[in-house]
Amino acid sequence: MSNPTYKVHFGRLSFTSPSQLSINASPGGKSMSVSGKFGGIENTMSHLKYLRDELASLAYCEEIIPFRYDGDTTLNAYVKINGASVSTSRYHLAGFSYNVEMEIIGREGDVMFESRLTGSLIENNHSISSTSEQFHAPPGNHYAFINGSANTSNLRLAGDLTTDSATDTCNLYLKQGSNLRNNNSIYSVDIEDYYKGACRVSMGTHTEKANGSSTETTVDSVRHGKHAGEWSVGEKLVIENGLIKLELGTSATQALFKTYIWDVVAYATEHNWAFSHDTPTTGNHLGDDFLGWRRVQILTNRPELVVVRCTTYKATDKSQRLVVDFALKRGAHHVSIIANQYTAGTKLNISLSEAPSTNASATNIANGYLVDGTSSPEDNNSWILGSPSELVSTSSITNRGMIQKVANGATFSAMIGYVLRDADTGNPLGHNDADSVFKQYIDNVNENQRIIKA
């Protein structure tokens, strides 16, 4: 049955057509098995190992995913992978065979999705006790949405990460209300739209070929579940949701990361950030540098939320650890950060990696955040850097785009986001101004999406 022009798609993972597909049905339910041997365009060892690792991770994560088969779309359904095996007869091309066992949960008409919205407003030192900025963003192209507490619906244009085009977009609707978490959100989404606007983790790279005679190309390795692949020192790590992207820095001597915001047709407004230790001395932009990242772990990897943990250290004897969790929600214009350093007695800094040409605006430092002070910022979008903690207001710190806690402590919670402006007027869009984005972080609604029978 194999046809090299057809592919099977397990969630975001795709490869050429299987040699056998079996369906089993009984009063207890319906299942399907897919087996074959990697070949066709899977003809580099790097690609084969990537597919092996991701199939194993999908079987390990116990999540519902969309299944599609180009050769017979009537088999498309939401499924749960109960087991996957990859057998290696020899480490040589065509030596990898696979078998995937799936439980069929239902077709699009058989199921709906429910997002359980939990959590509470983050404790803060800025007298924020309530907001109207609780938000939830269902997948792009969702329909039949229900949540009795969602009073407003605001549009955010996101990059469509499900296509091969770098400029395709999808509409995400921010469902908001001051009591949004009082009710779960229920909606439907077609299989081909399941990952529109979804969060995604790319970790490392692998090589692929379009066909047996084409040149190898290096592509980012999109990871499935939280037990996928392996990150090596200096490799790429990206978390993104089509609205904001964070890329881990690859420097060996500094703990750096970059952020970007989606602006109509592409990620733009790149900024480079750094973690440093202790108050900077005269003439230095940063405090003591932590070394480059040494360890990356995926903690959560779901369409509605991704969390990655990054670890490094500062001392020459390999001590003085820094651990940072980066979290990103579907629909968010900000990345949440929880950093934990080795001591509570010295300041931990989050800042631009280099001094800005214009001092950062500290007008709202008492309200928890700094904003890009440039009158005409890159791409007309401004960064925002904030924390629920009371922040040092000394101009020598804030001018350089740096935040420090007033109180000592090993843990530092923070956020980095963007003020997105209307291309015609130059004014911040109502739900994307600095105060709104910061409060969307403070009044963050935790989400856990699950499938339910229609």
Image (cartoon, grey):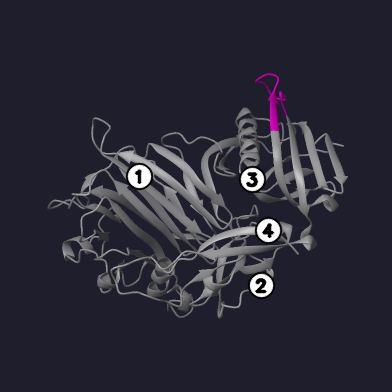
Residue 344 is at least partly visible in this image:
yes
Disc 4 and disc 3 in contact, CB within 8 angstroms? no
Q: Nearer the viewer, residue 353 or 79?
A: 79
Q: Which residue is mark 3?
A: 62
Residue 5 is at least partly visible in this image:
no
For discs 4 and 2, the disc positioned in front in the rendered view: 4
Q: Which residue is mark 4?
A: 451
For discs 4 and 1, the disc positioned in front in the rendered view: 4
Q: Which residue is mark 1?
A: 323
Q: Which residues are magenta?
A: 85-97
Q: Earlier in the sequence, mark 4 or mark 2?
A: 2
User: Residue 437's quadrant in the figure?
Assistant: bottom left
Q: Earlier in the sequence, mark 4 or mark 1?
A: 1
Q: Circle 4 — which element?
A: strand
Q: Is residue 89 magenta?
A: yes
Amino acid type for the residue under numbered disc 2: Phe
**Quadrant of the image for the N terminus?**
top right
Separation of residues labelled 1 and 3 (CA atoms): 27 Å
Q: How many marks?
A: 4
Amino acid type for the residue under numbered disc 1: Val
